[in-house]
Image: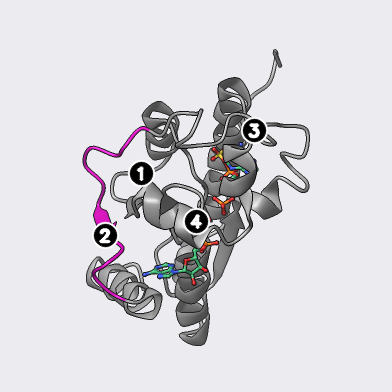
Amino acid sequence: MATNIVWHKHDVNKKARSEALNQKPSVIWLTGLSGSGKSTIANLLEKKLYSESKKTYLLDGDNVRHGLCGDLGFDDKDRVENIRRISEVAKLFVDSGTIVITAFISPFKADRAYCRSLLEQGEFIEVFVDTPIEVCEQRDPKGLYKKARSGDIKHFTGIDSAYEVPEAPEVHLTYEDETPEQTAERLFTLLSTKGFV
Ligand SMILES: Nc1ncnc2c1ncn2[C@@H]1O[C@H](COP(=O)(O)OS(=O)(=O)O)[C@@H](OP(=O)(O)O)[C@H]1O
Ligand SMILES: Nc1ncnc2c1ncn2[C@@H]1O[C@H](COP(=O)(O)OP(=O)(O)O)[C@@H](O)[C@H]1O
């Protein structure tokens, strides 16, 4: 625990940075099972925002686990720490004026709520990518469900590790509704309606 530390207030702040970028920062937090479509949707949404000259950053589970969270595994304790670190990073990006998109399974309600609690009212937009496990398992883009079923991977979400369904997400996506492109377009429209872009 760090002690004897004080918070420094800087003159160039979130408001100034946001005005310079002509956008309002936020976190679009995609949550759902492995293979539900988080990365696909996140990537398309970022491309759309980028094409509109918006400053964005995409934090993606697999990528972050190569570096910042490379020391963490997949038991409950490590998942909690994973999302805690991501939340703190997302907050820093928001302070920089950036629109952050995150694509983590983030299976626990309390951890998603933690990120929300770090931000200002309205800045956290929870998007539940509600693809049933049968569909995710059929897609199995990385072959992980196969490995989990055969016991090669332990603590796999939806098989022998929990996923707590969001109770009141800002956006609830059911996989049959639309293509990933249409979903990204809809999320962009939502950001526009809410005045973020
Ligand atoms: N045991 C187990 N359970 C779930 N997922 C696993 C596991 N082992 C490896 N992987 C791969 O790690 C990606 C999930 O990492 P996250 O950081 O998003 O997970 S979590 O939010 O901490 O639960 C996940 O990525 P996505 O498929 O994109 O969700 C998997 O590729
Ligand atoms: N409506 C949809 N939304 C998102 N992904 C879809 C959809 N339909 C099919 N897919 C496919 O499902 C797979 C989802 O993989 P991915 O985006 O890596 O999921 P996750 O990041 O949640 O693990 C991709 O191969 C994607 O092309």
Which quarter shows the N terminus?
top right
Q: Is residue 128 above or below residue 165?
A: below
Disc 3 and disc 2: Cα gap in Å?
29 Å
Label annotation for residue 35? 4
Q: Earlier in the sequence, mark 4 or mark 1?
A: 4
Name the amino acid type tagged 1. Glu
> Badge 1 is on which residue?
120
Mark 3 to mark 4 CA distance (whole Å): 18 Å
**What residue did someone put label 3 on?**
151
Image coords of residue 169 (percent x, y): 26, 47
Are dots 2 and 4 in contact, CB under 8 Å?
no
Cβ–Cβ below 8 Å for labels 1 and 3? no
Q: Residues within 10 Å of mark 3 (few under 14, many from 20)?
A: few
Q: Depth-wise, is mark 4 or mark 1 nearer the camera? A: 4
Q: Which mark is residue 167?
A: none
**Residues in magenta?**
164-178
Quarter of image, res 162? top left
Q: Earlier in the sequence, mark 2 or mark 4?
A: 4
Q: Is mark 4 within 8 Å of ligand 2?
A: yes
